[in-house]
Image (tube, rainbow, N blue to C red):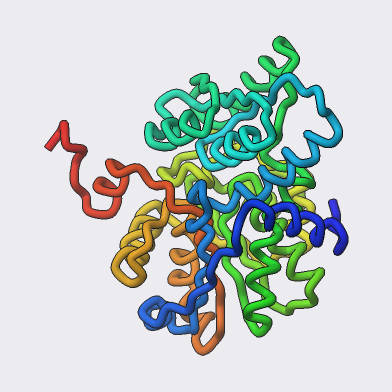
Amino acid sequence: MQITADELRQARKTVGEVLTPTPAHCWPLLGERVGARVIVKHENHNPTGAFKVRGGIVYMDMLKRTQPDCPGVISATRGNHGQSIALAAAKAGIPVTIVVPQKNSREKNAAMAAFGARLIEHGEDFDDAKAHADALSAEQGLTFVPSFDKCLVSGVAGYGAELFEAHDDLDAVYVPIGLGSGICGTIAARDLLGAKAEIIGVQAEGSPAYARSFAAGHPVSTNTCKTFADGIATRIPDPQAVAMINAGASRIVTVSDEEIAAAIRHYWTDTHNLAEGAGAAPLAAALKEKHANEGKKIALILSGGNLDLDLFRERVFGAPPPDEA
């Protein structure tokens, strides 16, 4: 998959009709922790609280033009992709059904429903939910919206373009990897704008499919994905994403859930921003590689801030939920 300059330009125009650019702030306290000048790209400031809304807007714009009589769309998600599709589909006037795993985030479920989505719970994880959404798509005649697609990558590449235009002297950018649209969009933006920064992917130790795929040079699935960071909890990598990441990223760093939780706490104390697990993972990776970042200028993609209150209490402060306290 290759994103052209014209595709990126048009995607940014489409997204710009709905969203304003997100800030990229320099945070001195984070810099002291990491030993580098740290720029945070605040995708948590989007209307859905995450970067994926950019791709949803571009995808629904394409669908409205190519399938004007589309009876509805369906997709699978742990939350942020579903909010993105729900918001964008509502703006396009297209009914949307979202399949989520059982015991999914209650707060993300509520947000998707508030944007107008019909929710269905099925399976133990994202990949189970995706298989069920595929089946329902065929049964009910709904258009399936994937979590990785050229339109989605073109849309989210806009945050990378905004970042590199504002900071063309970055040495490295740390990007979380769920199914891959965010890091692939960042790679595409870097290459199209002629930036020189290393792109470093970040995964949870308990969900290392892309890290293993990077090491192997081809897609490698895992049997389980064990991490509280639901935005990066995937077992089956997308082959197109693997090819683009393996060609354009410098490396993939894995971090523990404990390191992610510490990074959430650092974001809260140092910037007063709430980061979800996936959004905090790049900071965790930069801290893990502190020795390699000394004196450099790096960027962290704070991809989202949709962290449930109970999970925030448990992971950051070690407090049990209210009904167990």
Q: Which residue sits at x=60%, y=64%?
A: 21
- Looking at the figure, which quarter contains the C terminus? top left
Q: Nearer the viewer, residue 126 or 218?
A: 126
Q: Which residue sits at x=62%, y=19%?
A: 132
Please identify the residue farthest to the left as the structure is shown. 325
Q: Nearer the viewer, residue 68 or 215?
A: 68
Q: Residue 232 at what x, y percent from top left? A: 53, 46
Residue 236 in the figure: left or right of residue 320: right
Residue 16 occupies which quadrant of the picture? bottom right
Q: Which residue sits at x=57%, y=35%?
A: 82
Q: Nearer the viewer, residue 270 or 34?
A: 270
Residue 308 occupies which quadrant of the picture? top left
Q: Residue 177 at what x, y percent from top left? A: 60, 52
Residue 275 occupies which quadrant of the picture? bottom left
Please identify the residue farthest to the top as the structure is shown. 139
Q: Residue 70 at what x, y percent from top left? A: 77, 23
Please identify the residue farthest to the bottom as the structure is shown. 295
Q: Residue 89 at what x, y percent from top left? A: 65, 34
